[in-house]
Image (cartoon, helix red, strand yellow):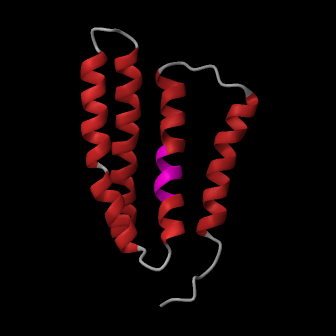
């Protein structure tokens, strides 16, 4: 439960940072605000990333794939929706493959540690 909550907070912060960068890049008058918001929230999310590693002490690879892919897939989906990105079928497939790869890595088995 703690891991799921920590991941959700980390993903939300990473997604917010990406959205702030994109929003700020759309207009020179918003650039500084988007830059600052994205960096403050994105950099602060590292506290939760470190907690994720602490919660999975015997499987740092799983911690990395869960943290990185969740933020990536969430960002891709929200950027496409909010900013009406026209993704090709191959790009959608790539996003789906990242999600599938995360599932495979998560279900991949035990590390042998208790």
Quadrant for residue 89, please give it.
top right
For the point 29% across and 45% down, the residue is: 43
Quadrant for residue 85, please give it.
top right
For the point 47% across and 80% down, the residue is: 58
Residue nearest the observer in this picture, 46 or 79: 46
The region drawn magenta spans 66-71
For the point 24% across and 38% down, the residue is: 40
Residue 28, image x and y in percent? 32, 9
Residue 92, image x and y in percent? 68, 34
Residue 46 appears left or right of 81: left
Residue 101 appears left or right of 41: right
For the point 25% across and 19% down, the residue is: 32
Residue 104, image x and y in percent? 67, 64
Residue 9 lies, with reference to residue 85, above or below; the image says below
Q: Is residue 59 magenta?
A: no
Residue 98, image x and y in percent? 64, 49
Quadrant for residue 56, please give it.
bottom left
Residue 9 lies, with reference to residue 114, above or below; the image says above
Residue 65 appears left or right of 47: right
On-image quarter of the N terminus:
bottom left
Residue 33 lies, with reference to residue 39, above or below; the image says above
Q: How many marks?
A: 0
Q: Main secondary structure of the magenta part?
A: helix
């Amino acid at each position: 439960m703690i891991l799921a909550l920590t991941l959700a907070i980390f993903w939300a912060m990473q997604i917010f940072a990406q959205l702030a960068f994109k929003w700020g890049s759309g207009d020179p008058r918003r650039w500084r605000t988007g830059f600052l918001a994205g960096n403050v929230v994105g950099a602060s999310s590292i506290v939760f990333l470190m907690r994720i590693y602490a919660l999975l002490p015997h499987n740092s690879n799983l911690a990395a794939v869960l943290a990185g892919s969740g933020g990536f897939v969430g960002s891709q989906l929200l950027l496409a929706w909010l900013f009406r990105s026209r993704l090709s079928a191959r790009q959608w497939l790539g996003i789906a493959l990242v999600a599938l790869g995360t599932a495979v890595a998560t279900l991949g088995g035990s590390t042998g540690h208790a």
